[in-house]
Image (cartoon, rainbow, N blue to C red):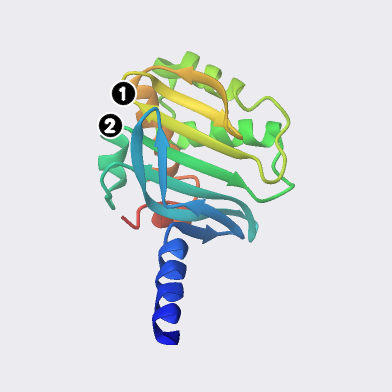
Amino acid sequence: MKKAIFLLVAVLTISTASAQTKAAGVTLPNTQSFEGEKLVLNGVGVREKFWMDMYAGALYVQSKSNSGEKIMAANEPMAIKIHIVSKLISSDKMIDAVNEGFQSATNGKTSAINSEIEEFKSFFKEEITKDDVFDIVYLPKQGVTVYKNGTKKGNVQGLEFKKALFGIWLSNNPADKKLKDGMLKG
């Protein structure tokens, strides 16, 4: 009987543990659902700057892949979760990072999506604090929707915008190479 109880506890512990992933001291779910679309964790990484953890980033997709190009180009549901782990991130610093990220991801070719970028940046104008969580969700019929701590901040339409946005993390010139590698574990 003791063996049966021990085995049951072990199985429950393993199945519960596998439902989440840890990075940068925070726990991220292995699945997410948005508007009825179930997404699976493709990978997790940590954005570092000057050897300090800034945020944990998780990529959620319908089908796992280790190709950043394929994920960026796909017109299918996906999401990036950003869990802030540093007190050093402010609204101004996040907006600066977004500007830099779009420039890098598009090789400076942002003129066709400038208005979309401006709209996206407006979602980060409120104060940002440690443990804030942003969900950046792409659904083909709705475009990109941004949630902060579960509250919808706004929406930006367009597949070209989505490609450039996901390119911040997944392009050949990502914001953080180790973060990209973690997100693309597939």
- Residue carrying label 1: 140
Which residue is drawn at the image coordinates 48% and 55% (left, top)? Answer: 45
Q: Earlier in the sequence, mark 2 or mark 1?
A: 2
- Please tell me which residue is depicted at 67% across the width and 24% down the height of the picture: 125
Q: Which one is nearer the viewer's eye here, 47 or 26?
A: 26
Q: Is residue 173 visible?
A: no
Tell me, for residue 76, which label it has, or none: 2
Residue 68: x and y in percent read 31, 45
Q: CA distance from mark 2 to mark 1?
A: 6 Å
Front residue of 109/162: it is 162
Q: Classify mark 1: residues with Cα within 10 Å, few (<14), some (14-19) or many (20+).
A: some
Which of the two residues, 55 or 2, is positioned nearer the viewer here? 2
Element carrying mark 1 = loop
Report the front residue among 3 and 133. 3
Q: State if disc 1 and disc 2 touch (CB < 8 Å).
A: yes
Residue lying farthest to the top in this orientation: 115
